[in-house]
Image (cartoon, helix red, strand yellow):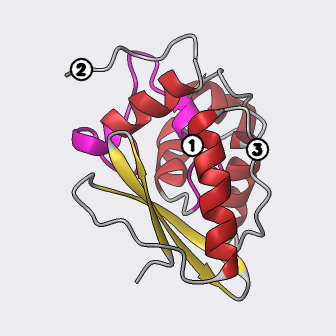
Amino acid sequence: MFDLVVAFPWMKVAVKTRDERVSEIRYLPSSASVVEPKNPLAARAARQLERYLIDPDAGFDLPLLVEGTPFQRRLWDALCEIPRGKTLTYGTLAKRLEAEPRAVGQACGDNRLPIVIPCHRVVASDGIGGFAHSTGGYLVEAKRWLLAHERAADAFELEP
């Protein structure tokens, strides 16, 4: 199903490719099996994900297959403008895009290319908020780790 699965703290990161582009990145539970790259693009993605694990300033240079509504695409472009180590609230991003915070949250959750399109940098006004349409479990812990890894000023303490 996936062309690559890489181990990260709190999760595994899975990558699918299609038509010589990365079509999906998905967070899987840490119990998922690692999958070695099945094609050259998956190998390139693996190298870039491994570099990001070592250095959160390492950028991504992957051909992406970005599919979504015009609003989703506008939001995802805005996510890419949030610098590493910074966050925005759903409400702030909604005001910038003249949208409702729920629409922002939904579009963040629908992001099929997380890490590369950094939806983890969007938080609630009263806490970390949800992640990938989840409000608990390994996905929210993964968001905490990603924010801490990027040294976001308002990253929340990891729970044991």
Q: Position of residue 117 (x, y in %)?
A: 65, 50
Q: Is residue 103 above or below residue 26?
A: above
Disc 1 target residue: 119
Q: Is residue 119 above or below residue 87?
A: below
User: What range of the chain is rendered magenta?
Assistant: 113-140
Q: The disc labelled 1 sits on which kind of residue? A: Cys
Disc 3 target residue: 59
Badge 1: few (under 14), some or many (20 or more) residues near its Cα, within 10 Å?
many
Q: Position of residue 124 (x, y in %)?
A: 45, 25
Q: Are marks 3 and 1 in contact (CB under 8 Å)?
A: no
Provide the secondary structure element on which disc 3 rests: loop
Disc 2 target residue: 159
Q: The disc labelled 3 sits on which kind of residue? A: Gly
Quadrant hosting residue 65 = bottom right
- Left/right placement of residue 133 relative to residue 115 reads left
Residue 19 seen in the figure: yes
- Please state which of the two labelled residues, at mark 2 or mark 1, is closer to the viewer: 2
Q: Position of residue 96 (x, y in %)?
A: 74, 32
Give the main secondary structure, helix, strand or loop, of the magenta stretch.
loop
Q: Are marks 2 and 1 in contact (CB under 8 Å)?
A: no
Q: Position of residue 86 (x, y in %)?
A: 65, 21
